[in-house]
Amino acid sequence: MGGVDELDQSISLYRIRIHSKKWRWLLFTYMIDMAMANAWSMQVIAKEEPMDQLLFRRSVARYYLRQSTQRNIARPSSSNIEGLRLNGVEHVLEKLPTRVRCFICHIRGRWGCKKCKKILCIEKSCFANFHS
Ligand SMILES: [Zn+2]
Ligand SMILES: [Zn+2]
């Protein structure tokens, strides 16, 4: 059996089954399946006691779920961001290389807050209003 046949068989065992009419989605899920099958076969070659494919896929899924959960915990809550915006410390105007729309009034300007990473104009006092 050739390498391509083995890969196809390995993919077909635990293929991602999400029905969609969009071909891009099918291609995307096939690529994930292919990457998982390749990773699993490398793990079979490398380890003395390799996992079966289902266990391997579950452990990869658990790993990424755990990563996303930890990232959500580490991310500051919206109330913390609100506190940073209004604390009046280290909000410095930063000149931008191009004109970009103001976060509040949507008029094109060249200024933003370095700390908040928001585009805020000074012509209409949006910088001052945003921080008070
Ligand atoms: Zn503005
Ligand atoms: Zn700011």
Image: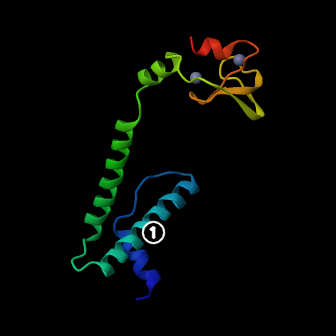
The C terminus lies in which quarter of the figure?
top right
Q: Residue at x 40, y 66 (%)?
A: 36
Q: Which quadrant is home to the N terminus?
A: bottom left
- How many marks the image carries: the answer is 1
Q: Nearer the viewer, residue 17 or 2?
A: 2
* Quarter holding ligand 1: top right
Question: Left of 76 or right of it: where is 88?
Answer: right
Identify residue for label 1. 34
Question: What colour scheme has been applied to the protein in the rendered image?
Answer: rainbow
Q: Residue at x 37, y 76 (%)?
A: 42
Residue drawn at x 32%, y 62% as measured from the top left: 57
Mark 1 residue crowding within 10 angstroms, few (<14) / some (14–19) / many (20+): some
* Image quarter of residue 54: bottom left
Please give the name of the residue rendered at 72% of the width and 26% of the height, measured from the top-left corner: 111
Q: Is residue 43 above or below residue 18?
A: below
Secondary structure at numbered mark 1: helix
Image coordinates for residue 34, horizontal then vertical, percent: 45, 68
Q: Is residue 1 above or below residue 112?
A: below
Q: Quick check: is the Cβ at mark 1 less than 8 Å away from ligand 2?
A: no
What type is the residue that disc 1 sits on?
Answer: Met
**Picture coordinates of residue 62, whole percent (x, y):** 30, 53
The spot of residue 88 in percent (x, y) is 53, 16
Going by the image, does 43 lie left or right of 92? left
- In-front residue for pair 82/72: 82
Question: 19 above or below 92?
Answer: below
Relative to 104, 132 lies left or right? left
Q: Position of residue 128 (x, y in %)?
A: 64, 13
